Image (cartoon, coloured by chain):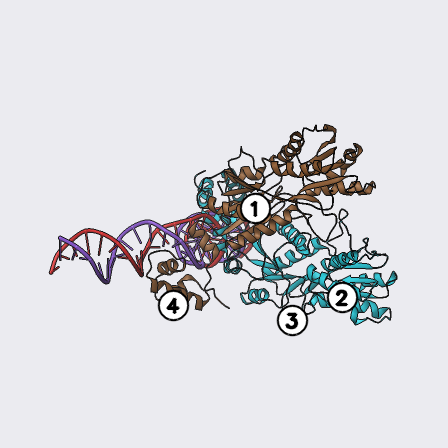
Chain colours: A brown, B cyan, C red, D purple
Amino acid sequence: MGKHVTLDDVARAAGVSRATASRSLNNRIGVREDVRRNVQKVAKSLGYRPNQAARTLAGGSSSVIGLVLGSAGPRSYSYEAVIVQEVAKAASESDLGLLLVADALAPSQGVRNLLSDGLVSGVVVSVVATRNQWVNELLAADIPSVLIGQGESESPIRTVEVENLESSAEVVGHLLDTGCRRVGTITGPLNRYDAAMRYRGYRLAHERRSLEVDDSLVFEGDFDRDRAYELAAPLLDQNPDGVFGANDQSALAVYRRAIERGLVVPDQLSVAGFDGSFADAYVSPRITSMVQPFREIARGAVGALIEVMGGSNDVSSQYIDPDIFFGDTTR
Amino acid sequence: MGKHVTLDDVARAAGVSRATASRSLNNRIGVREDVRRNVQKVAKSLGYRPNQAARTLAGGSSSVIGLVLGSAGPRSYSYEAVIVQEVAKAASESDLGLLLVADALAPSQGVRNLLSDGLVSGVVVSVVATRNQWVNELLAADIPSVLIGQGESESPIRTVEVENLESSAEVVGHLLDTGCRRVGTITGPLNRYDAAMRYRGYRLAHERRSLEVDDSLVFEGDFDRDRAYELAAPLLDQNPDGVFGANDQSALAVYRRAIERGLVVPDQLSVAGFDGSFADAYVSPRITSMVQPFREIARGAVGALIEVMGGSNDVSSQYIDPDIFFGDTTR
DNA sequence: TGTGGCATTGGAAGCGCTTCCAAGTAACGA
DNA sequence: TCGTTACTTGGAAGCGCTTCCAATGCCACA
């Protein structure tokens, strides 16, 4: 093994200068075609592999992007597990490395440094809290960033996310249209944009059918399953015949609680969620839900990030439509 | 924002040389205590953040490790989702960045380069196939590596994994001890060490009770759920009263197929698995399983990697004992 | 034949940091 | 008092790569 093959070695072996070698390998213009080909051939035969650190240092930008996740990272069967998977894939397709930063709400200093200096030339953020530390820090550090799922017009950051309003209206509408008269909801934290929109969608579905929302059926949760499980008790006390969970975890919690109370789902209670993380043919329940097109979202986010890294100042939000999945928790 | 604060800036502001500044910030010996403190104070007030690329280039090693995953990455609710989560956490605790390389069986050239040169100073590998490309390449490239879950004495690589033999014997023993007489199994790919061990454990449990294994109840799978679902059909045709899936995904598939056939679990058929990825109080079924202590494994792997990066030549395997979880798929 | 212009190329200057090495200094024992 | 040792420090040399800039060679054209 011994020493590393450096660009110098390649240049020497090919009989050109290091500058020319570099240009050849990076497909820069200004190299005669035959020279370029020769250099590339030599590099290959020598097994040359550019040192990424040196390249980053000299070139000013690396080919690694970061993925910042809120909470403790990909809790199994969660929204985040899928995000990780799809973003990793998308990054890889663009020949970008993916630096994963989980548990982002309490980043250790060391890891934060990784993000802020040098190693990473862009970041995809999918954190849970609104207006959080991370976004501000990234903006302050002037490092290219794209948000997944936090569309909030006030922050001047490019965002890719699922369409929340109409899709929530759609799934709630399905509940209403299949006979539910008292549809309750466990919302997400309403200071979050997506949570707020889903709640608006819930109301919108009622309005469109000229139905009143009974506010005693509305409980503000925080997208956390255990919290939703707590809230399910008082909610079920109100005798709803349908529940919309603002995410699948919340819907699942309500389902659980309902079953434990001996309710028959969906005959006595319909349950719908949002995210589509339980549209799994092998486990129960399969929750009726708006399925986020995660692949598309991840690809969109990575693509947008590449643009931003390339200098784009576009800070628009991109909304991607989910598809409804009819599971076995609704009629 | 403007310029980046460099070490030079700090040194100048603190009235020392860059060398001293560097030593101070890295807590190297050979700096007077008051000087060190002053430098650190100045650095902080200037908001100095070392450029990781430069540090890597100059120092020869980075503070990022890679995590190589086989298959398409963290499929939700899978073994891998948990691995990602725990390794990320463990790395973060050691102030290491985590570069995620999913879909490792077909790594794009670019991403592979990331691993092999510079950016990463060590790798944790959790790939599915035995004797795979990755391991060989990493060994050849002489980059510090630790394997999760592929203990195989022939490859001289440090390994951390769950204890497979006795634990499989334990869970299968549970089936046998709760009345099952015909316990079948869907194994993993038997050319893999862990799969082979679990299968041996399955046989061992029988031997210890002086029971014969009916080979027509043994089907070789590949840890994949869909494949297991296919195999479940002929397996169930043999009228087993218990099934051991070599991983939870396989057990789940059998469970599914059994339910679809109208079998009552666990009354007519007990199902047990391995991994503990379905010990979730909210979804069904909760499969009886050997629960891998993922956190411990991840911490162990990262710890081992740190040792290897530090020069250790220890290539031993570390086996960590799982705990049995009694779900509702067994009596 | 002379000259400007263009395409290629090599030299060299860093990117920001670590670390070897030699120089400077203070403290110690004889 | 002076030589020694033990610490601290700064200078400087890179780590491997990109890229600016000047130099070269070649062509077309007048």
- The mark nearer the N terminus, 3 or 2, is 3
Query: Are tags 4 and 3 found on a single chain?
Result: no
Pointer 4 chain: A
Callout 2, which amino acid?
Pro
Callout 3, which amino acid?
Glu
In the picture of the structure, the residue carrying the numbered disc 4 is: A13
In the picture of the structure, the residue carrying the numbered disc 1 is: A297
Callout 4, which amino acid?
Ala
Callout 1, which amino acid?
Ile
Quadrant where the image shows the C terminus of chain B: bottom right
Query: Are tags 1 and 2 found on a single chain?
Result: no
In the depicted view, which residue is nearer to us: B256 or B143? B256
Q: Residue at x 76, y 52 (%)?
A: B279
SS class of the residue under badge 1?
Answer: helix
- The mark nearer the N terminus, 1 or 4, is 4
In the picture of the structure, the residue carrying the numbered disc 3 is: B154
User: Which corner quadrant of the image does residue B150 belong to?
Assistant: bottom right
In the depicted view, which residue is nearer to us: D16 or B239? B239
- Camera-side mark, 2 or 4: 2
Image position of A168 with respect to A78: above or below: above
Q: Position of residue D19 (x, y in %)?
A: 36, 51
SS class of the residue under badge 2?
Answer: helix
- Camera-side mark, 3 or 2: 2
How crowded pointer 1 is (Cα within 10 Å; few <14, some 14-19, many 20+) is rated as many
Q: Residue at x 62, y 34 (%)?
A: A197
The alpha-carbon separation of the residues under discs 2 and 4 comes to 61 Å
- Camera-side mark, 1 or 4: 1
Res A176 label: none
In the picture of the structure, the residue carrying the numbered disc 2 is: B234
